[in-house]
Amino acid sequence: MEQERLHPEATGDLSNLLYDICLAAKIIARNVRRAGLTDILGGTTTVNVSGDLQQKLDLVANETVRNSLQHTGRICVMASEEDEAPIPVPANVPAGKYVVLYDPLDGSSNIDVNVSIGTIFSIYRRVSPEGTPGKLADCLQEGLRQVVAGYILYGSSTMLVYTTGNGVHGFTLDPTIGEFLLSHAHIRTPEVGKYYSVNESNWNKWTPATQRVVGAFKNGDGAMKGKTARYIGSLVADFHRNLISGGVFLYPGDRKVPQGKLRLLYEAAPLAFIVEQAGGAATDGSRRILEIAPQELHQHTPLVIGSRSDVEFATARMAAE
């Protein structure tokens, strides 16, 4: 509403689209809180397009976001980490001017052990002609063209963190009134972090350059003081902690999987937009994440993201390999 006030020419479509996402988040948050009491814990027998075993709550969250958005007339197409192809709007619904890409439940492998998980989303303006069905090209846009990026964290409280390119703001869901209330205005991440987050069990698979970077974060190296390891294994939870407290998250490629595990469009690009707006940085080890032109809907990318000085240090060391 504040952004609408600052932009009198706004139609309200984008604000209403954010409300639609918030509605989905409230429904997912309810299901997460009741997961141990209903039959939505555990895995299914299916895998998604990236080869990950789908959890029951993955599918519930995916359908919740889809059903909250596709009948509104505000989007022309959407794409999910859980679906192989773009999701068109129904034939009887007008095609809107926005595109939504989302990871319905990041960190879902941690659902059964009650670890924080989250929904990640990004919104683009369509590039295909208005009034026509959305196309794959609408989804394959550089992160620099995002209009909004955000995530909802389902943890000790349910938080929405988002940016429209004018800073980063956090809202906490007040369950007594069912609304997200501003709790963290103008979030800025520290220039240098005190944490590093990486799955060190992959050490023997990493390149020597990656080993040197993680070793420097762990033990210190010249001007780089040693950091404390904090790794949850849920990207959105690790990212949120580092955003607030300062730190760097790494999911590098390795000898077996050079492009890493994380998805460019559903995870890396939206979080990169958020972290840059908060004063941080995000690269794939050499390139700025927001400048990578996606070639595939489910394209993977290595990711180094967090406090600016830490990311720049890691990127410089990796480039020197």
Image: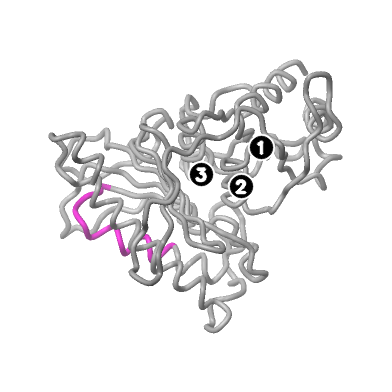
What residue span does the magenta drawing correspond to? 62-76
The label number, if any, that marks residue 241 in the structure image: 2
Q: Which residue is mark 3?
A: 298
- Identify the mark nearer the N-term, 3 or 1: 1
Task: Assign a secondary structure to mark 1.
Answer: strand
Q: What residue is at 48 percent from the left and 28 percent from the top? A: 290
Say if mark 1 contacts mark 2, CB within 8 Å: yes
Q: Which residue is mark 1?
A: 247
Q: Residue 283's spot in the image, x, y percent? A: 59, 28
Disc 2 vs disc 3: which is toward the camera? 2
Residue density around tag 1, few if under 14, some if 14–19, many if 20 or more, within 10 Å = many
Q: Earlier in the sequence, mark 2 or mark 3?
A: 2
Above or below residue 221? Residue 242 is: below
Q: CA distance from mark 1 to mark 2?
A: 8 Å
Q: Is residue 64 magenta?
A: yes
- How far apart marks 3 and 1 lie (CA) works out to 27 Å
* Three-letter code for the amino acid on which mark 2 is drawn: Arg
The image's mark for residue 40 is none
Mark whose residue sits in front, 3 or 1: 1
Evaluate whether residue 150 shows in this view: no
Q: Is residue 49 visible?
A: yes
Please give the name of the residue rendered at 47% of the width and 37% of the height, measured from the top-left corner. 274
